Image (cartoon, grey):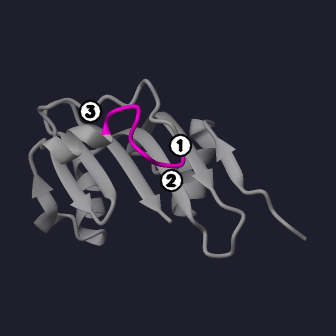
Amino acid sequence: MISCGIETDDKEQIFYLWTNSDLPNDVKTINAKYWESGHWSKEYEIYIHLKPSEKWWTDFKKINNLNSSKANFSAEINSKLKSDFKSILTIPKWFKPTVNSTVYQKENSEYYWNEKTHDLFIHEIQL
């Protein structure tokens, strides 16, 4: 049997697809877009805008080893926010992290945290 994979913008379903766990009470999903291959290796790409609690974000950074990957907006980061950037999914119009965000990078993925508003924009890709 061949699976065609998944592509969805159902923000209620995407957190579970991405993490294999239910959305915690201290996190709100604002928007999301997700693609997953039908391959056993679970290749995926996600754009998600969350409003997490400070505690959830602190735990997430620790679990994902993001503390040492802090950066500012750079030419490379800005190029990844342009509509012609090469990826599986087209960057959604709502994916607009502000330049006031702190950027954390891990391989080809970026995490944009705005400390004042607690907006978290995530672009994760695993191919």
Q: Measuring from the top left, give residue 25's x and y in whole percent.
A: 44, 46
The residue under label 3 is which amino acid type?
Pro
Residue highlighted by disc 2: 45
Please rate how many residues cluster around mark 1, counting C-alpha atoms within 10 Å: few if below 14, some from 14 to 19, many from 20: some
Residue 89, which numbered label? 1
Q: Measuring from the top left, give residue 110's x and y in whole percent.
A: 29, 52
Q: Is residue 61 magenta?
A: no
**Circle 2 — which element?**
strand
| Lower position in the chain sequence, tag 2 or tag 3 | 2
Residue highlighted by disc 3: 97
| Lower position in the chain sequence, tag 2 or tag 1 | 2
How far, Cα to Cα, is label 2 from label 1? 7 Å
Quarter of the image with the N terminus in it: bottom right
The residue under label 1 is which amino acid type?
Leu
Point out the residue furthest to the right here: 1
How far, Cα to Cα, is label 3 from label 1? 17 Å
How far, Cα to Cα, is label 2 from label 3? 17 Å
Please rate how many residues cluster around mark 2, counting C-alpha atoms within 10 Å: few if below 14, some from 14 to 19, many from 20: many
**Circle 3 — which element?**
loop
Q: Residue at x 9, y 46 (%)?
A: 72
Which span is picked out in magenta? 81-88
Q: Please identify, in this view, whether the residue under mark 3 or under mark 1 is nearer the observer.
A: 1
Q: Please identify, in this view, whether the residue under mark 2 or under mark 1 is nearer the observer.
A: 1
Give residue 113's quadrant in the image.
Answer: top left
Q: Is 63 on the left-hand or right-hand side of 84?
A: left
Q: Measuring from the top left, give residue 35's x and y in whole percent.
A: 60, 50
Is residue 39 depicted above or below 52 in this figure? below
Is residue 79 depicted above or below 95 in this figure? below
